[in-house]
């Protein structure tokens, strides 16, 4: 897994671009990328609410596409980058696919899988999944917040 700040920033900037594109299409401004080493396995922007599918979260779409691209269901060496802290639904998918590292820009404390009252993403006592992924938050948060403000997002 790359622990390279420059690479991490490049991937988060790509997530921010995907989020901006999602917003322009009438969706929530969320973008997500999954890498294996320095190779992008999959990327997506949010497809809800405009797509009318409540499961079309960027992270869900990317996890499914990355598993397809890698030819396997478990991705312990992968890194998932996303603009927003993964929600409960997305946290379940991340844990189920055993993604080893999650990097996000801004927290979503009410429904976030790491910072809410229900930390599905970071919980260590869920034996079914073993150890949680390594979680890093706040990457380019100011840059993402600026983009969201420019698009009229709260």
Image (tube, rainbow, N blue to C red):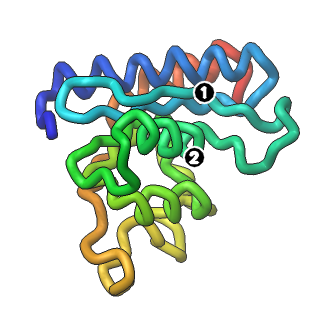
How many other residues sit within 10 Å of disc 1, few (<14), some (14-19) or many (≥20)?
A: many
Q: Residue at x 59, y 37 (%)?
A: 58
Numbered tag placed on residue 11 in the rendering: none
Q: In the picture provided, is 128 more to the left or to the right than 101? A: right
Where is residue 46 shown, x and y percent of the image? Answer: 66, 32
Judging by the rendered image, the residue that carries numbered circle 1 is 45
Q: Residue at x 61, y 17 (%)?
A: 20
Numbered tag placed on residue 60 in the rendering: 2
Q: In the picture provided, is 52 more to the left or to the right than 119? A: right
User: In the rendered image, which quarter contains the N terminus?
Assistant: top left
Q: Residue at x 25, y 72 (%)?
A: 131
Task: Determine whether 99 is above or below 113 in the image.
Answer: above
Q: In the picture provided, is 103 more to the left or to the right than 45? A: left
Question: Nearer the observer, disc 2 or disc 1?
Answer: 2
Quick one: label 2 or label 1, which is nearer the N terminus? 1
Where is residue 17 shown, x and y percent of the image? Answer: 52, 15
User: In the rendered image, which quarter contains the C terminus?
Assistant: top right
Q: Which SS class for mark 2?
A: helix
Q: Nearer the viewer, residue 96 or 154?
A: 96
Q: Residue at x 14, y 34 (%)?
A: 2
How many other residues sit within 10 Å of disc 2, few (<14), some (14-19) or many (≥20)?
A: many
Marks 2/1: CA–CA distance? 10 Å
* Residue 154 showing in the rendered view: no
Q: In the picture provided, is 149 more to the left or to the right than 17? A: right
């Amino acid at each position: 897994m790359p622990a390279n700040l420059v690479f991490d920033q490049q991937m988060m900037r790509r997530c921010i671009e995907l989020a901006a594109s999602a917003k322009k299409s009438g969706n929530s401004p969320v973008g997500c990328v999954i890498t294996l080493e320095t190779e992008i396995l999959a990327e997506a922007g949010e497809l809800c609410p405009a797509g009318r599918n409540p499961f079309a979260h960027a992270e869900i779409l990317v996890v499914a596409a990355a598993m397809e691209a890698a030819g396997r269901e478990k991705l312990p060496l992968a890194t998932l980058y996303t603009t927003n802290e993964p929600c409960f639904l997305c946290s379940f998918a991340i844990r189920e696919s055993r993604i080893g590292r999650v990097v996000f820009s801004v927290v979503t404390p009410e429904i976030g899988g790491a910072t809410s009252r229900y930390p599905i993403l970071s919980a260590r006592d869920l034996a079914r999944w073993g150890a949680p992924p390594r979680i890093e938050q706040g990457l380019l948060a100011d840059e993402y917040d600026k983009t969201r403000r420019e698009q009229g997002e709260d």
